Amino acid sequence: MIRTVGLHKAFGPKTVLAGVDLAVGQGESLCVIGQSGTGKSILLKCILGLVAPDGGQVFWQDRPLDAATRPDFFRRFGMLFQGGALFDSLTVWQNVGFRLRQRMPDARARALAIEKLARVGLGPETADLMPAELSGGMAKRVGLARAIADDPEVIFFDEPTTGLDPIRARRINDLIRGIVTETGATAITITHDMDSVRAIGDRVALLQDGHIAWDGPVAGMDRAAPLAGFLGRS
Ligand SMILES: Nc1ncnc2c1ncn2[C@@H]1O[C@H](COP(=O)(O)OP(=O)(O)OP(=O)(O)O)[C@@H](O)[C@H]1O
């Protein structure tokens, strides 16, 4: 469904992506892991068109993602940003219903936003709170509700458990897995957190030295030699 072919990106003399070939199928949940600074965020930004690669191409449903196809893609994707990235001046329901409000009356957008808030375990009393009034875990849930508000076909999760304690992180991982399974959405998760990989992923890809150094099922990652260093084994 989404495929990168030979993605290349350098900043001055520093090559970050040196030919990244990666594919995620319809309804599949792929986690991309890698040490800090290996280029996971740059890869995500190249897929989203926020950073222009120096070479290579991104395909969505076998069509190149470019200026002509990206608007359609943008209507069909959702994203949970690292840290939530809620709009401070909007209430919780306005954040969740941000896209919905562009094409429906507020009353309907609010009702749908409250449905999505319920899906992530937040009651209607949270709808009129401001982001500053939320705990870190609640903000993450609101970000998740916003990511799924428009019933996306593809969802990107950028470091979904960053800043959460282990119990809250586990709840968010379980919530994400449940949502991905029940919606049948294609999911791409960028993470350092191997608990997230085990909970969320069907497949895992290791980004290292600008390439995908290993790519395989999550169930097989403990036996994969290239992952040994990353998993902290000798
Ligand atoms: N605009 C930029 N100009 C120069 N270098 C950049 C720029 N953006 C990213 N880089 C460099 O590209 C490399 C990859 O960055 P990236 O943020 O993708 O890493 P990451 O794997 O997501 O790291 P982390 O897990 O710490 O978020 C880093 O060395 C970073 O310094």
Image (cartoon, helix red, strand yellow):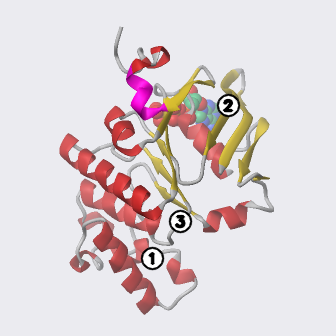
- Which badge, 3 or 2, comes first in the chain's sequence? 2
- Which badge, 3 or 1, comes first in the chain's sequence? 1
- Would you name the residue on which mark 1 appears? 97
Name the residue: 30% across, 43% down: 163
Which quarter of the picture shows residue 144?
bottom left
Residue stretch rendered in magenta on the structure: 217-222
In the image, residue 69 sits, relative to residue 8, either above or below, namely: below
Q: Nearer the viewer, mark 1 or mark 2?
A: 2
Which amino acid, mark 1? Gly
Residue 138 shows in this picture: yes
- Which badge, 1 or 2, comes first in the chain's sequence? 2
Quadrant of image for the C terminus: top left
In this view of the protein, which residue sits in the foreground, 142 or 178? 178
Q: Report helix, strand or loop for mark 1.
A: loop
Which amino acid, mark 3? Pro
State the image coordinates of residue 153 (x, y, percent, origin top left).
56, 62
Sort mark 3 into few (<14), some (14-19) or many (20+) by Cα contacts within 10 Å. Answer: many
Sort mark 1 into few (<14), some (14-19) or many (20+) by Cα contacts within 10 Å. Answer: many
Determine the quadrant in which ligand 1 lies. Answer: top right
Which quarter of the picture shows residue 5?
top right
**For residue 20, which numbered disc appears in the image?**
2
Name the residue: 24% across, 51% down: 171
Determine contact: label 3, label 2, CB under 8 Å: no
Q: Nearer the viewer, mark 3 or mark 1?
A: 3
Which amino acid, mark 2? Val
Majority SS type along the magenta span:
helix
Instruction: Judge whether residue 221 is colored magenta.
Output: yes
State the image coordinates of residue 200 (x, y, percent, origin top left).
39, 45
Q: CA distance from mark 3 to mark 2?
A: 25 Å
- Would you name the residue on which mark 3 appears? 152
Name the residue: 64% across, 63% down: 74
Sort mark 2 into few (<14), some (14-19) or many (20+) by Cα contacts within 10 Å. Answer: many
